[in-house]
Image (tube, rainbow, N blue to C red):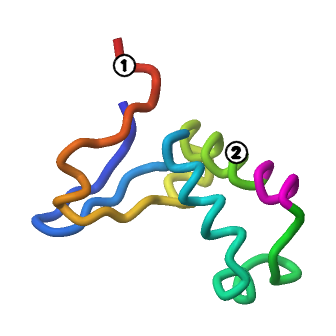
Amino acid sequence: MSASLETPRPRLRRLVPADESDLLALDSDPDVMRHVGSPAGVKSPEETAERVKRRVLDSGRGDHDGLGFWRVEGRADAASPPSTGSER
C-alpha cells in the first residue's frame, strides 16, 4: 500500500508509475526546469526519462527517509487513486 496524507481538501501521495507521463511533461518544460536541477534547465529526452523513472522508483521504495517527491491532488482527483500495478 502506498503512503499518503489526506486532508479535507488536498491529498499527498507517493509517486506511482502512472505519474510518469505528468512528470515527463513537467521535466520537459523549460519554464519549470529553469528553476530545477544542477545545473538548472531541460535535459536530454533520455536523461529526463531516466530521472523520472528513478524518482518514481525511489518514491515507491520509501527512499529519502519519508521525504522526497509527493504528488498533490485535489479531493476530486483523489476519488480514484491510480493503480500501482501491485493490487490483486
Q: Position of residue 37 (x, y in %)?
A: 78, 76
* Lateral position of residue 13 relative to residue 11, left or right: right
Which residue appears at 88% of the width and 81% of the height? 39
Q: Is residue 31 magenta?
A: no
Q: Which residues are magenta?
A: 45-50
Question: In the rendered view of the protein, which quadrant contains the N terminus?
Answer: top left
Image height check: is 14 above or below 24?
A: above
Give the prevailing secondary structure in the magenta stretch: helix
How many other residues sit within 10 Å of disc 1, few (<14), some (14-19) or many (≥20)?
A: few
Q: Amino acid at mark 1?
A: Glu
Q: Position of residue 78 (x, y in %)?
A: 24, 52
Q: Position of residue 52 (x, y in %)?
A: 69, 53
Picture quadrant where residue 47 is located = bottom right
Q: Is residue 46 magenta?
A: yes
- Please give the residue where the numbered disc 1 appears in the rendered image: 87
Q: Position of residue 49 (x, y in %)?
A: 76, 51
Of residue 28 and residue 64, the one placed in the foreground of this image is 28
Mark 2–mark 1 distance (CA, rounded to whole Å): 20 Å
Which residue appears at 46% of the width and 24% of the height? 85
- Please give the residue where the numbered disc 2 appears in the rendered image: 53
Which residue appears at 23% of the width and 67% of the height? 10
* Lateral position of residue 1 relative to residue 37, left or right: left
